[in-house]
Image: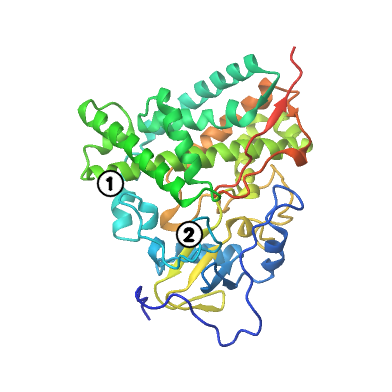
Amino acid sequence: MSYDPTAPGTTTDDTATEEPPTLPTDRHTGCPFDPPAELTALSDQPIRRMRYADGHLGWLATGHAAARAVLSDPRFSSRYEFLHLPVPMPGLEGVTEMPPAPVGDFLGLDAPEHTRFRRLLTGNFTVRRMRRLSERVEQFTHECLDAMEQAGPTVDLVEAFARPVPALMICELLGVPYADRDRFQGHVATLFDQSAEAEAKGEAFTALGRFLGELVAAKRAEPTDDLLSDLTSSDLTEEELIGVGGVLLAAGLDTTANMLGLGTFALLSNPGQLAALRADPDLAEQTVEELLRYLSVADPILRSALEDVEVEGQLIKAGETVTVSVQAADRDPHKFPDPDRLDIHRKATGHLAFGHGAHQCLGQQLARVEMAVAFPALFARFPTLRLAVPPQEVPLRERANIYGVVSLPVTWVKE
């Protein structure tokens, strides 16, 4: 059975005996690094019915195998106009249909449209470019640490380190003058803020597009050795170039910045694990993989069935949306024993922090390099680094598409 996008989106389940749950999002209680307690309680079934914000009756996948199955199956669509929002969003209350992806936003496309963008971009993430960027990561990291040391001994780690490092790197990748970072950082933050009103998001989207339009024009006039300049010689239209640039700029900045901030918080809260990393810097890459699994900041991922599909014994009907809870899947004890414990000696291979399947994160290797350099360098430079406030006073990004900390006050003993 194929999905007819003009058909009503809300489905019913004649076999249901009780009202399906809505997506739990409340992290106010318990460990700030754990999924919501109510979500964990639902993980006894790898995939179950879930009620969406607009009344749609869809599904929630919390099991690792179920999540991989949905994300890797081309019978599930990423197109925004087929999806239903799992929770209400400010300014979109009562909205039952999502608009299609803006031009250039390949995250909201399926094959073959998505394939066209993906192949083009993958070809520009060359070994030479990644090697050069890896060398620059070390330089940028130490420059940020130098500035942090001068500003200390008490700073907001987000502003001093977690945000500048990936901002410098995404500017380097795309060829954005770093002096212009303030022009786009605020717009990106608004776009990822679930509590921001629709009008504010629209203004941020327009302003970011205007900025990228100016940048694309400059690259066409005077190309340099960067990804955006390379793309100007492709078959992408001006509007597509601006859209692609926006996706890469936003994704490359916000996700890694929040992993660095929240990851530092997690390591400071687990002194035994931090001591192990300090004692053996060769554990850096393994630490990064475990932090990615343990924190899973980019959550959830939505898909819609294009036809009837069976997953883990459940029949997902055409048109039904599936919410894939990455944080729950990466805490699945069937895949990761003792999953609620941060263990940097764990082999966290197979986590879903970068997604899975055709839409798996393009910049994942660069993000891994950034974190593998940044974490050891931070703790080597400041061996007495600690939180400057009680852990319960660290403000969390509970209403954002990417989970993390709003700020992370830290201090150290200045010699």
- Give the class, few, some or many, for how many residues have Cα within 10 Å of label 2's Cα (few <14, many ≥20): few
Q: In the picture, residue 163 is in which quadrant?
A: top right
Task: Say which label, 2 or 1, has the lower sequence index.
Answer: 2
Q: Amino acid at mark 1?
A: Glu
Task: Identify the residue at the far bottom of this view.
Answer: 14
Q: Nearer the viewer, residue 290 or 111?
A: 111
What residue does disc 2 label?
92
Could you tell me residue 337's position as x and y percent? 71, 57
211 sits to left or right of 382: left
> In this rendering, would 374 be left or right of 172?
right
Give the Cα separation between the discs numbered 2 and 1. 26 Å
Q: Is residue 69 visible?
A: yes
| Most foreground residue, 412 or 21 | 21
Q: Amino acid at mark 2?
A: Leu
Coordinates of residue 133 in the picture (x, y in percent): 43, 29
The reply to whether residue 133 is visible in this rendering is: no
Horizontal and vertical percent position of residue 394: 71, 38
| Residue bearing the label numbered 1 | 240
